[in-house]
Image (spheres, rainbow, N blue to C red):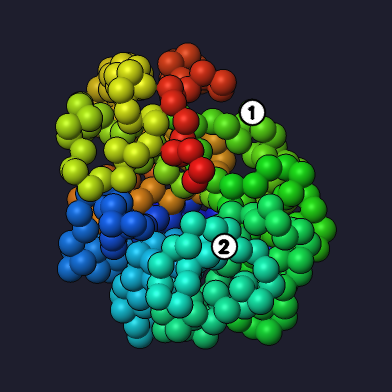
């Protein structure tokens, strides 16, 4: 059963569902912290299989997640079903031989190749559909990193290239080296920074698709979190400024206003927030590790808005005045 529309991601030929699945939370995080709560591997596998049934076959992972465990979980999930899947993974946060994050970025060509070969082994495949540079290394010219990534395409190990969390200037420079298919960046009613920086507009002008991660504000836009104490002790959101102290309660007040709009429309706040992202003409990859939430997210793709409803949402969380607090802890 395939319930999702498919769209062109960028102008290089890749067709994807309007919603993919962010898989980061399906395994443990980095540094002993969980990704938005403890993961149940068996349920994660069931969620991945259900996603494929629903046509959510754009699966997004990275070598950092786990590290490595997330890619290996996906490899198990898609064994014997590789042709059904659009597989996206990333590199750039340096992971050492002991499979630990070193705290550094590494965009060196040699490291890019090492990372790809390692990811292919983890995923149990001989090619990746969409390979991203997770973060640009400020010590390495983007031309050098993307130049090596372009050779992966020539070798048939990667089909399409993307970047994550870069501004318009780096995006243009990289695109001159090899045509990019996607820019992946955080984008939600909580974080409309890509509209402020011009990254979203630049991607559209260049014919590069846009993939929104954390379209539900790391789950906060669901309205299920009412107090900082609702986060488990090892939940990584405890480290994020947006979910700490006064920022938490300022952001909760915004979510409560969204909940009122959602109730009037007969949908959940999470569905309203996700449908708003999709209404911007981008592809979203909401993350979940449970089938129930997956199915609710898929249902959100059918939600349409009137101009008045969009204006009402925009009035609550306009560009330049969204969530209180920084998106990441200092130094990340």
Query: Does residue 82 appear in this view?
Result: no
Question: How many numbered circles are shown?
Answer: 2
Q: Nearer the viewer, residue 317 or 20?
A: 317
Which mark is on residue 136?
none
The local secondary structure at tag 2 comes to loop
Would you identify the image quadrant in which residue 176 lies? bottom right
Image spot of residue 16 (x, y percent): 52, 60
Residue 247 found in image quarter: top left
Residue carrying label 1: 196
**Quick one: label 2 or label 1, which is nearer the N terminus?**
2
Q: Nearer the viewer, residue 265 or 203?
A: 203
Q: Residue at x 45, y 84 (%)?
A: 121
Residue 284 point in image, percent of width and height: 47, 47
Residue 15 lies in quadrant? bottom right
* Above or below 71: residue 117: below
| Neighbour tally class for label 1: few under 14, some 14-19, many 20 plus, Cα within 10 Å | few
Residue drawn at x 68%, y 42% is 167
Relative to 149, is 328 on the left or the right?
A: left
Question: Residue 34: percent from the left, percent from the top?
Answer: 27, 53
* Quadrant holding the N terminus: bottom left
How far apart marks 2 and 1 lie (CA) works out to: 25 Å
As helix, strand or loop, the secondary structure at mark 1 comes to helix
* Depicted 70 relative to depicted 123: above or below: above
Give x and y (percent) for residue 110.
Answer: 66, 76
Name the disc covering residue 92, or none: 2
**Could you classify mark 2 by the number of other residues whose Cα lies within 10 Å: few (under 14), some (14-19), or many (20 or more)?**
many
| Residue 311 visible | yes
Q: Which tag is nearer the camera, tag 2 or tag 1?
A: 2
The residue depicted at 45 percent of the width and 77 percent of the height is 97
Q: Going by the picture, which residue comes out furthest to the right?
A: 176
Please give left or right for residue 94 compared with residue 291 in the image: right
């Amino acid at each position: 059963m395939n319930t999702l529309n498919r769209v062109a991601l960028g102008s290089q030929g890749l067709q994807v569902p309007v919603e993919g699945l962010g898989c980061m939370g399906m395994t443990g995080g980095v540094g002993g912290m969980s990704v938005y709560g403890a993961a149940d591997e068996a349920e994660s596998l069931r969620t991945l299989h259900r996603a494929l049934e629903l046509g959510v076959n754009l699966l997004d992972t990275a070598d950092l997640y786990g590290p490595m465990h997330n890619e290996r979980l996906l490899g198990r999930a898609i064994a014997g079903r590789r042709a059904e899947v659009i597989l996206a993974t990333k590199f750039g946060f340096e992971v050492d031989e002991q499979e630990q994050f070193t705290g550094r970025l590494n965009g060196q060509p040699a490291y890019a190749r090492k990372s790809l070969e390692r990811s292919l082994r983890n995923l149990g495949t001989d090619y990746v559909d969409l390979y991203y540079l997770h973060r640009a290394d400020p010590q390495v010219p983007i031309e050098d990193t993307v130049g090596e990534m372009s050779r992966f395409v020539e070798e048939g190990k990667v089909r399409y290239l993307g970047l994550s969390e870069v501004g318009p200037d780096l995006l243009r420079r990289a695109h001159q080296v090899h045509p990019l298919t996607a820019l992946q960046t955080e984008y939600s009613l909580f974080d409309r920074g890509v509209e402020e920086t011009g990254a979203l507009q630049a991607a559209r002008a260049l014919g590069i698709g846009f993939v929104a991660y954390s379209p539900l504000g790391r789950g906060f836009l669901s309205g299920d979190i009412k107090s900082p104490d609702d986060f488990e002790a090892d939940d990584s959101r405890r480290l994020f400024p947006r979910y700490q102290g006064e920022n938490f309660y300022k952001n909760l007040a915004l979510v409560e206003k969204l909940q009122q709009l959602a109730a009037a429309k007969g949908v959940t706040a999470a569905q309203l927030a996700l449908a708003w992202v999709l209404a911007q003409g981008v592809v979203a990859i909401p993350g979940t590790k449970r089938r129930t939430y997956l199915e609710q997210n898929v249902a959100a793709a059918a939600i349409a808005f009137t101009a008045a409803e969009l204006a009402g949402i925009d009035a609550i969380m306009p560009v330049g005045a969204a969530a209180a607090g920084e998106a990441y802890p200092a130094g990340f």
